[in-house]
Amino acid sequence: MLMSRRIVFVFLALVLALGGCQLDTGVKVIKMGHAQVVSHPVHQAMVFLGKRLEEKSGGKIKVKVYPNQQLGTERELLELLQIGSVGMTKVSAASLEAFSPEISVLGLPYLFRDDAHITQVLEGEIGKELLLSTEKYWLRGLCFYDAGKRSFYSKTKPIATPADLTGLKVRVQESKMAINMVRGMGGSPTPVSYGELYTALQQGIVDAAENNPPSFYNSRHYEVCKYYSIDEHTAIPDVVLVSTKVWSELSPEEQVWLQEAADESAVYQTKLWKEAVEEALREVQKAGVEISYPSKEPFLEKVAAVYAQVFQDQKQLEALVQRIQQTKK
Ligand code: GCU
């Protein structure tokens, strides 16, 4: 399975050749790959980004969006951006951890006070620094998309307290921070790519996972996991990125159009998000999922140990966490 994925990946890398190619007609087409399904609000936002860029450029630049891991997992997509075979992507900030230790900070549990705090941090200086922190690895962040809050879902029982995670194999994103977080909460973390998670849950390779409501719903994981416990342990945003190879081939004017189109798509995505969360919760409940709202206290009690473990490995994150905590309006 792993082998065939790798072959397909290398094959695609060769076939795709260039992430932003100029056709004979003089029209530039930027390939944008991502891991989500088309019904998810982030896909709709990326299509909107393409539409706005096409309008701003008078039809000279187009974006072709490839959903569903068609071009690779988030990790593979980032590698394809680095070599310029794919021009743009949208990944979870967790997937950027290998390229920017700073950005992994967003995966710390209960890092933000509330939604306003998230906006203040991501739209302020820290957000700008984080978006550009991967540029030295040929990945330029353009904007954040809202990815709400992540909560546990399980095949066997509600997760009312961290003790319920004991003995459970919990799927995590391919991120050391996520591994530390779930281990610190008491579960056994198992990294699996998003596109392979449905089968992993179905076959019992993992017993549980965690995500925001639109992803839980659109990925159809709710068909297998009938318990969704809204503990909202993390608020990891998504990031829209462009390969610096493609970015540097754009004229200054085209760069402005792309940045504006990305920013406008982020505003659009935020609007879609709230509705998508409500719809997801309504639909999964209709499908027989038991939704619970556990007290956050016992989860918060585990946080200090998780932070201590993370700071032990990455001392430099301590100052960044302090800056985030001190961020106010
Ligand atoms: C969220 C995020 C995706 C990511 C997924 C995951 O849905 O938006 O980019 O792939 O989480 O858990 O892997």
Image (cartoon, grey):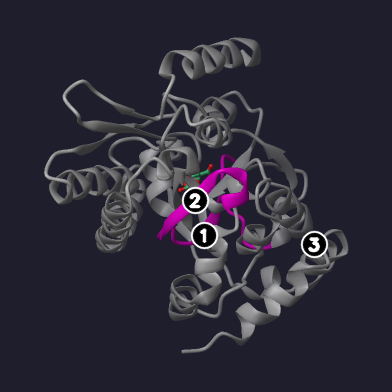
Of the residues under marks 1 and 3, which one precedes in the sequence?
Answer: 1
Read off the magenta span. 135-161
Corner quadrant of residue 160: bottom right
Q: CA distance from mark 1 to mark 3?
A: 21 Å
Residue at 54%, 59% in the rendered image: 132
For residue 202, side relative to residue 270 (left or right): right
Lower sequence index among marks 1 and 2: 1
Question: What percent of the width, then of the height, locates residue 79?
Answer: 57, 33
Considering the numbered disc 3 on the image, is that residue within a helix, a strand or a loop?
Answer: helix
Mark 3 sits on what residue? 310
Give, as a three-letter code, the residue at label 1: Leu
Picture coordinates of residue 148 (x, y %)?
44, 61
* CA distance separating discs 3 and 2: 26 Å
What is the secondary structure assignment of the residue under circle 1?
Answer: helix
Determine which residue is flagged by label 1. Answer: 131
**Closer to the camera, 120 or 143?**
143
- Asked whether the viewer can see residue 239, the reply is yes
- Quadrant location, the N terminus: top right
Ligand 1 within 8 A of label 2's CB? no
Q: Furthest residue to the right?
A: 312
CA gap, disc 1 to disc 2? 7 Å
**x, y percent for residue 273:** 31, 59
What amino acid is found at the position of numbered circle 2 in the picture?
Answer: Arg
The image shows residue 329, relative to residue 145, as above or below, that is below
Q: Report how many numbered discs are placed on residues in the image.
A: 3
Contact, mark 1 vs mark 2 (Cβ under 8 Å): yes
State left or right for residue 214 relative to residue 155: left
- Residue 140: give its label: 2
Picture layout, residue 139 above or below residue 322 = above
